Amino acid sequence: MEKENTATPRLSSSGHVLPLSMVHAGECVKVKSISGKDDIRRFLSNIGFVEDTEVTVVSEMNGNVIVNVKGTRVGISKSMANRVLIV
């Protein structure tokens, strides 16, 4: 029997908004907002990073992350991950 993913989004331990690049593998978080210029925000929105979306970090290395977002596995650079703010 396959185990259902029951991870719930977490608020950062300090209660503050953090960039996605600070999240460790296995953690499930919720997107609070996207920072940056319009073209960057549009790009991230097109690949699933929109407010209130749950994101699970699959792996993280030096700030670069692979995440599950809306049922799709996506890899983004550290600079892009810094623009995705989570709670």
Image (cartoon, rainbow, N blue to C red):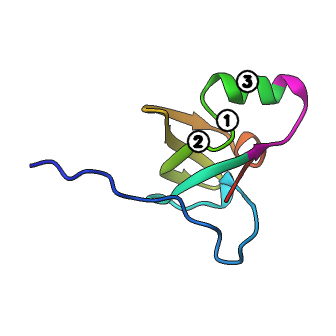
Report the residue at 88% width, 37% height from top: 36
Residue 77 located left or right of residue 5: right
Query: Magenta segment range?
Result: 33-39
Question: Is mark 2 in CB contact (under 8 Å) with mark 1?
Answer: yes
Q: Nearer the viewer, residue 76 or 15?
A: 15
Residue 8 located left or right of residue 53: left
Report the residue at 52% width, 58% height from top: 9
Residue type pointed to by label 1 = Val
Q: Is residue 68 above or below residue 17?
A: above
Q: Is residue 55 above or below residue 19?
A: above
Bin the neighbour count of mark 3 within 10 Å (Cα to Cα): few under 14, some 14-19, many 20 and up. Answer: few
- Residue 20, position in %: x, y? 66, 52
Residue type pointed to by label 3 = Phe
- Secondary structure, mark 2, is loop
Report the residue at 34% width, 57% height from top: 6
Question: Is mark 3 in CB contact (under 8 Å) with mark 1?
Answer: no
Bin the neighbour count of mark 2 within 10 Å (Cα to Cα): few under 14, some 14-19, many 20 and up. Answer: some
Q: Which label was assigned to residue 50? A: 1
- Residue 26, position in %: x, y? 44, 58
Q: Which residue is mark 2?
A: 53
Mark before the other along the chain sequence, 2 or 3: 3
- Secondary structure, mark 3, is helix
**Real-space Cα separation, disc 2 to disc 1, in angstroms:** 6 Å
Q: Which residue is mark 3?
A: 43
Which mark lies nearer to you, 2 or 3?
Answer: 2
